[in-house]
Image (spheres, helix red, strand yellow):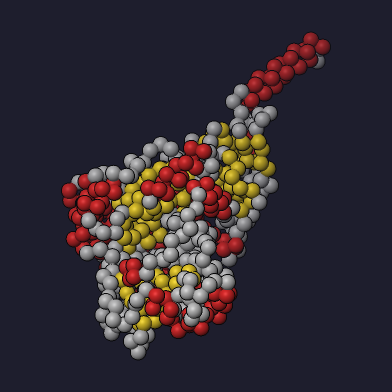
Amino acid sequence: MSKRIKLLVAVLWLSGAVSACNSITSDPADLILVDGQIITLSNQGVVEALAVRDEQIVAVGSNVDIREHQGPQTHVIELAGRTVIPGLTDNHFHGIGGGDGVNLAGARSLQEVLSAISTRAEETPPGDVIITNSDWHEGQLDEQRLPYRDDLDRATQKHPIVVVRGGHEYVLNSAALAYWDIDESTQAVAGGRIGRYMDGRLNGELVDRAKGLVQLPLVPDRSLAEIQDDLVESHRILSSRGITSIRYPGASPEMYDRLLALREEGRLNIRVDFLYRGPRSGSPEVLNAVMKEWAQPEGNDFWLRVGGVKLGVDGGFEGGLMREPYEEPWGESGMFYGLQMLPREDFLETVQVLHSAGWRVATHAVGDAAIDLVLDAYEAANSESSIASSRWVIEHGFIPRSDQFPRMKDLGLAVSVQNHLYLAAPSLIEYWGEERAAWTTPVRAYLDNGIPISLGTDSPVVPYDPWWVLHHFTTRETISGGVVGADQRISRDEALRSATKGYAYLTFSEDYRGTLAVGKLADLAITAENYLTCADPCLETMLIDLTIVGGRIVWER
């Protein structure tokens, strides 16, 4: 080859290299992840790498393709074969749990519960009320039962004790019953239950509306800054588990204002979908007054959006409204079917008022009879003007029946499900019998009947960990009851889609999140093990190496 030709080749090569370099760096990515197994949940399947710019995914594909988006300032994350999944979500998050009360989260026996209360009593002046935190369940105890009045009397008789269990039940000792003037002559409360021993004595249980007989001491005033800091810390804990979006189901205007302040201050590191809490009175007049305080729904800011109003028609584990009575002795000789929170006509009218005002409705319904009531109300609203494209919601939906699936589908409903059974299996078997307990939250049946679902926890009623949710629904394993309802297992792919794409559908944001595709928000998590192939029970204890929201690292192990 002549010197002239060699020179020409060199010039052409250099020109091409410079041109290629210019094309690579002309609009570089802010962040790229390479050499991994990225589960996109899109039609591209599992890819090696992706690129992010300005909060959004701009490319997914091979390592070679994505490295072309690298510039001098691009942050490069070398995955070294690790798995990336779309950011996880919680469709029903009230709070992280904890608090200033007696901590029972670590108790594993009744004696440990009583010891924790006794220790607090030793530090508390006689006569002062002692309250526990709510984030525990009897399913975590060896005895698989609640501590009742006589048990609590062994902890202290000098202090009124209120054991708070989840969001639906208190248990009081004798001193507390006397403190609030509750005795065998106290009248039953509509929508509530006052528990008794077999001999007719009060056992200290106050369920749902019966909790209103107790006025807990006021919590000492805390500054707005302290409250805001607690919210930020709770969101940080969720980020450490790979969660990038949460839905507050039924909160106050004050809570919305706090979240908005965090957003405006740049301290909101998790995306929030917010539902207002409908008034419990069932009064249209009260509802109309309350609605004036609410921010308008939806919007284009995916850091904080209002998505509707939450209502409730029945109780929880111990009060879900059923077509058939509870198991004995809870069934009270075939007379106890659960608790109805609102009279039927009041609920129907409340739903109609909200519908007329343009609000999207989500209703807590545990039992099959409660689901009947919700469907009746939704169908009545639909007869006035269609809700089929509005994705109204049933929250929880523990015990749906085959005749209800077509009605749900016709109305275009979504169901927001959680892993209560994982924690509470022994209690649900006791209350409802083995058959109903095994059917609790039948995600396989929902999917097979074409009902859209999303996943969550109901924290602090059930602990906040999304990996317990994924483990439970893919195995139907429970903490202390073994496998319950094995026929309702779903695959890991189905579970991950429900926890990501399902949430996006629930919140009308499927064009923006739920998958790792070009144009979607860069919300993702890096897992320590391969989500699809690690051996059970790996999901239950999965570690998160990194969580990213909008292309920004919000947590790193």
Relative to the observer, which residue lies in front, 355 or 102? Answer: 102
Question: Which quadrant of the view contains residue 400?
Answer: bottom left
Question: Which quadrant of the view contains residue 318?
Answer: bottom left
Residue displayed at 65% across by 36% down = 75
Q: Is residue 228 above or below residue 368?
A: above
Residue displayed at 35% across by 62% down = 397
Relative to the observer, which residue lies in front, 4 or 55? Answer: 55
List x then y, in percent, for residue 378: 24, 55
List x then y, in percent, for residue 174: 42, 81
Residue 74 horizontal side relative to residue 377, left or right = right
Relative to the observer, which residue lies in front, 372 or 532? Answer: 372
Q: Residue furthest top?
A: 4
List x then y, in percent, for residue 454: 42, 55
Q: Is residue 528 above or below residue 272?
A: below
Do we see residue 173 in this rendering?
yes
Residue 342 horizontal side relative to residue 229, left or right = left
Q: Is residue 474 above or below residue 71?
A: below
Point out the image quarter for the N terminus.
top right
Residue displayed at 63% across by 46% down = 36
Q: Residue furthest bottom?
A: 199
Relative to the observer, which residue lies in front, 528 or 343? Answer: 343
Residue 292 horizontal side relative to residue 154, left or right = left
Residue 480 horizontal side relative to residue 341, left or right = right
All told, the count of numbered labels is 0
List x then y, in percent, for residue 77: 66, 41
Residue displayed at 61% across by 23% down = 26
Do we see residue 243 in this rendering?
no
